[in-house]
Image (tube, helix red, strand yellow):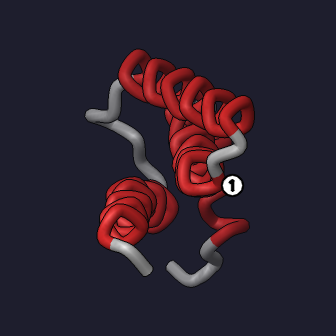
C-alpha cells in the first residue's frame, strides 16, 4: 500500500470514527439537546455531495466513508428532528438496556 492510500485510509477511518460516538451517545442518553439540526442538515448534505462526487469519479475511497458518515449523520439528524418521546422509543429499541 502506498503512502497516498495509507493517508486516505487513515482519513476515512477518522471521519467514520468521529461521528459514531455521537450516535452512540444519542442512543444511550436518549437525548439530543445541544445538537444543532442545521449543522447536521448541512453535514448530511455535504456527505451526500462527497458520496456523489466519489461515485462520479469512481473513487471507492471517497464513496465508502462518506456514505457511512452520511448514514450516521442522517440517523443523528433524524433523532434530533423526532419528538423527544419518539427519540427515546427508537433509542430504546436500538439499545434496550437502560
Q: Is residue 51 above or below residue 94?
A: above
Q: Left or right: where does residue 87 sit relative to residue 39? A: right
Q: Residue at x 34, y 59 (%)?
A: 11
Q: Residue at x 50, y 79 (%)?
A: 98
Counting from the top left corner in percent of width and height, residue 81 is at 57, 27
Q: What count of labels does the image hold?
A: 1
Residue 29 in view of the camera? no
Pick the front one: 32 or 58: 58
Image quadrant in which you'd find residue 5:
bottom left
Q: Left or right: where does residue 82 sit relative to residue 33? A: right
Q: Is residue 45 above or below residue 16?
A: above
Graded by Cα atoms within 10 Å as few (under 14), some (14 to 19) or many (20 or more), the crowding at tag 1 reads some
Q: Is residue 43 above or below residue 70?
A: above
Q: Residue at x 72, y 67 (%)?
A: 93
Image quadrant in which you'd find residue 87:
top right
Pick the front one: 11 or 16: 11
Residue 45 in view of the camera? yes
Q: Left or right: where does residue 9 sit relative to residue 79? A: left
Residue bearing the label numbered 1: 90
Pick the front one: 40 or 94: 40
Counting from the top left corner in percent of width and height, residue 18 is at 33, 57
Quadrant of the frame with the N terminus: bottom left
Counting from the top left corner in percent of width and height, residue 63 is at 64, 47
- Circle 1 sits in a helix, a strand or a loop, which is it? helix
Q: Is residue 14 above or below residue 40?
A: below
Image quadrant in which you'd find residue 35:
top left
Counting from the top left corner in percent of width and height, residue 74 is at 60, 38
Pick the front one: 31 or 43: 43
Q: Residue at x 67, y 69 (%)?
A: 94
Amino acid at each position: 500500500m502506498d503512502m497516498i492510500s495509507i493517508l486516505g485510509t487513515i482519513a476515512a477511518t477518522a471521519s467514520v470514527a468521529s461521528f459514531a460516538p455521537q450516535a452512540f451517545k444519542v442512543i444511550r442518553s436518549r437525548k439530543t439537546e445541544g445538537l444543532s439540526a442545521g449543522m447536521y442538515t448541512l453535514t448530511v448534505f455535504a456527505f451526500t455531495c462527497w458520496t456523489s462526487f466519489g461515485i462520479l469519479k469512481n473513487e471507492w475511497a471517497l464513496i465508502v466513508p462518506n456514505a457511512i458518515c452520511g448514514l450516521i449523520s442522517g440517523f443523528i439528524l433524524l433523532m434530533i428532528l423526532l419528538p423527544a418521546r419518539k427519540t427515546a422509543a427508537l433509542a430504546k429499541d436500538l439499545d434496550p438496556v437502560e
